[in-house]
């Protein structure tokens, strides 16, 4: 049996390998905490170690960090996959099955904002489906509050915005 920290790293790599989009820190942590495998601080250290060793990389927005397995991470997982027990693999599959819709939704509607050289805020919104970008646009607004509101509302209204645009543009 692998040392606990090594096993946790392999579990995270396995999770990232078996889903077709990045996972957030909260999604990874929830898996470990729901099953009481370990505590939050240990998982944060393990994630940090995976990043330091180049086995995962991050995709950051203003309100979340998502993790993606690297080719080195895939290679490492390939060599040590047998260290993950079938029961843990079943737990991972069950977690994805139970949380599939929530995980997909959280990863389908992406938004972020940044300050422009003109001292305004650029807000980038994306709608992704099955690893493909279906809609990607940037709006410029005057205030940080407006940028934050757009990012928040994008999560709830992306499908409606997409449908409205399609209706208007295909007339």
Image (cartoon, rainbow, N blue to C red):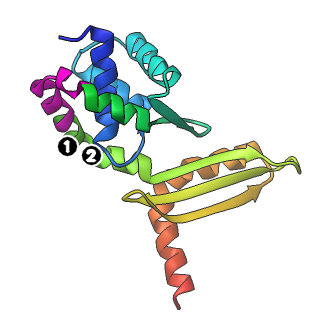
Q: Position of residue 103 (x, y in %)?
A: 34, 44
* Residues marked 2 and 1 touching at CB (< 8 Å): yes
In this rendering, position of residue 105 left or right of residue 38: right
Whether residue 143 is in magenta: the answer is no
For the point 62% across and 46% down, which residue is it? 112
Q: Give SS at disc 1.
A: helix
| Mark 1, residue position | 97
Q: Give SS at disc 2.
A: helix
For the point 18% across and 37% down, which residue is it? 93
Quadrant of the image occupied by residue 154: bottom right
In this rendering, position of residue 42 left or right of residue 58: left
Q: Which mark is residue 167?
A: none
| Mark 2, residue position | 100
Provide the residue span drawn in magenta: 80-93
Quadrant that contains the N terminus: top left
Q: Is residue 65 visible?
A: no
Indicate whether 23 appears above or below 76: below
Whether residue 81 is in magenta: the answer is yes
In this rendered view, identify the residue nearer to me: 146 or 129: 129
Indicate whether 131 appears above or below 98: below
Indicate whether 47 appears above or below 132: above
Q: Is residue 99 visible?
A: yes
Q: Position of residue 139 (x, y in %)?
A: 70, 60
In this rendered view, identify the residue nearer to me: 6 or 145: 6
Indicate whether 127 appears above or below 54: below
Disc 2 to disc 1, C-alpha distance: 5 Å
In this rendering, position of residue 8 left or right of residue 59: left
Mark 1 Cα within 10 Å, few/some/many (few <14, many 20+)? few
Q: What secondary structure predominates along the stretch shown in magenta?
A: helix
For the point 30% across and 24% down, which residue is it? 10
Q: Position of residue 2 (x, y in %)?
A: 23, 11
In the image, farthest residue toward the left:
87
């Amino acid at each position: 049996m692998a040392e606990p920290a090594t096993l946790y790293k392999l579990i995270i790599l396995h999770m990232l390998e078996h889903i077709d989009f990045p996972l957030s820190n909260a999604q990874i942590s929830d898996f470990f905490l729901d099953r009481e495998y370990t505590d939050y601080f240990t998982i944060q250290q393990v994630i940090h170690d995976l990043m330091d060793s180049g086995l995962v990389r991050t995709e950051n927005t203003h309100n979340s960090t998502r993790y993606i397995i690297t080719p080195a991470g895939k290679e490492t997982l390939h060599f040590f996959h047998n260290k993950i027990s079938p029961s843990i693999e079943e737990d991972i599959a069950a977690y994805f099955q139970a949380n599939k819709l929530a995980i997909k939704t959280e990863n389908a509607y992406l938004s972020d904002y940044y300050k422009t050289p003109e001292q305004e805020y650029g807000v980038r919104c994306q709608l992704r489906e099955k690893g493909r970008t279906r809609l990607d646009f940037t709006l410029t607004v005057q205030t940080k509050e407006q940028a934050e509101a757009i990012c928040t509302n994008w999560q709830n209204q992306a499908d409606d915005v997409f449908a409205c645009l399609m209706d208007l543009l295909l007339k």
